[in-house]
Image: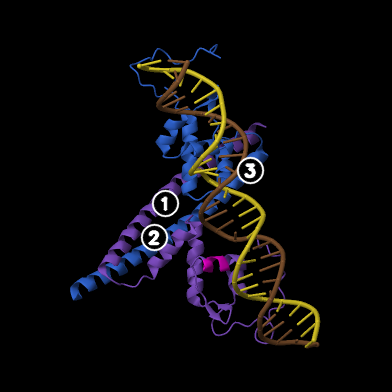
Chain colours: A blue, B purple, C yellow, D brown
Amino acid sequence: MDTTAEAGSGRAEGGTRTAEPPGGTHTIAQVAEEFGITLRTIRWYEDQGLISPERRGQQRLFRPRDRVRLALVLRGKRLGFSLEEIRTILDMYDAEPGETGQLRYLLEQIHRRRAELLQRQRDLQQTLAEFDELEQRCRDDLGRLESSG
Amino acid sequence: MDTTAEAGSGRAEGGTRTAEPPGGTHTIAQVAEEFGITLRTIRWYEDQGLISPERRGQQRLFRPRDRVRLALVLRGKRLGFSLEEIRTILDMYDAEPGETGQLRYLLEQIHRRRAELLQRQRDLQQTLAEFDELEQRCRDDLGRLESSG
DNA sequence: CGCTACGCTGCCGTTGACGTAAACGTAAGC
DNA sequence: GCTTACGTTTACGTCAACGGCAGCGTAGCG
């Protein structure tokens, strides 16, 4: 087990026993803290193939790449994509330029996704506009109530 | 993509037996067709208090107001809001200008929701930008493959 | 009168995205 | 050697948002 000389150089500082992360990596708890999600959620994302942190024995090692992907996952979620969709999008990102067929497929995917996002953008604009209207109405009502009450 | 495999029959107005909609109203089936959702979904939305069509006896009568609300519901869904959230937003729309306290609360709500939407807008922009980048990469790769292969 | 088309109300099933709990491993520190 | 902190897996629970079906009503046609 300890045959692998770990990259953690002489750290051994004064007593912080917080399961120190080796190299430039992070523990699952640190990542969870950083992104404001639970350990369970992170493990779930791994199960779903959204991230695949390395292992030191059983423990997960989160490298920068994983944290970037995680950020993308969360942004995808904010945009309302399902985890499944997010995975295919992520797969799009790091697809190797294989054959032209695959590239064409990827381009088509991009177009489809973009169309969705543009629709969402329109929805967003409209809703924001209506919020503005609503707010104006509110302010009017408020002014009326204050001046007459 | 409708799940109900039901081919449209002869659609003659007036004399036929298509459970004629009275006044300027529509039947549940017509509304479902119009919005591309199922009857089940519409009833579910009513259960959740998102719409409340009138009744002629047992049957639902959909008036313009209901269809407007339904459109808002679907837009909200496209934006990724839960039905619960959508209901509170809808409630915001037709809140009576009661007391100033309520109005202030409503304004606060509007601000909160708007902040969310603005966040989403940023997410959207970023993702769209990355799609552009990705597409460019794809096109480059494609050109390279075609010219060298 | 029965058939058919359309509608209604339950109620259970399903899927996605986790939460929660149980039961355990392991390394640090006293 | 025991505790404590952090981690692991597996299994089951939950909540939203419906789908699907059962069982029934009813309006109009022939």
Characterize the local packing of mark 3: few (<14), some (14-19) or many (20 or more) Cα atoms within 10 angstroms: some
Residue under numbered circle 3? A104
Residue type at the position of mark 1? Gln
Disc 3 vs disc 2: Cβ atoms closer than 8 Å? no
Q: Which residues are magenta?
A: B43-47
Q: CA distance from mark 2 to mark 1?
A: 10 Å
Give the image location of residue D8, x and y in percent: 54, 29
**Magenta stretch contains residue B105:** no
For marks 3 and 2, the one nearer the N-term is 3
Disc 2 vs disc 1: Cβ atoms closer than 8 Å? yes
For label 1, the SS is helix
Residue type at the position of mark 3? Arg
Disc 1 vs disc 3: Cβ atoms closer than 8 Å? no
Residue type at the position of mark 2? Leu
Characterize the local packing of mark 1: few (<14), some (14-19) or many (20 or more) Cα atoms within 10 angstroms: some
Q: Return the chain for callout 3.
A: A
Q: Return the chain for callout 2.
A: A
For label 2, the SS is helix
Give the image location of residue A112, x and y in percent: 58, 51
Residue under numbered circle 2? A128
The one of B100 and C12 positioned closer to us in this rendering: C12
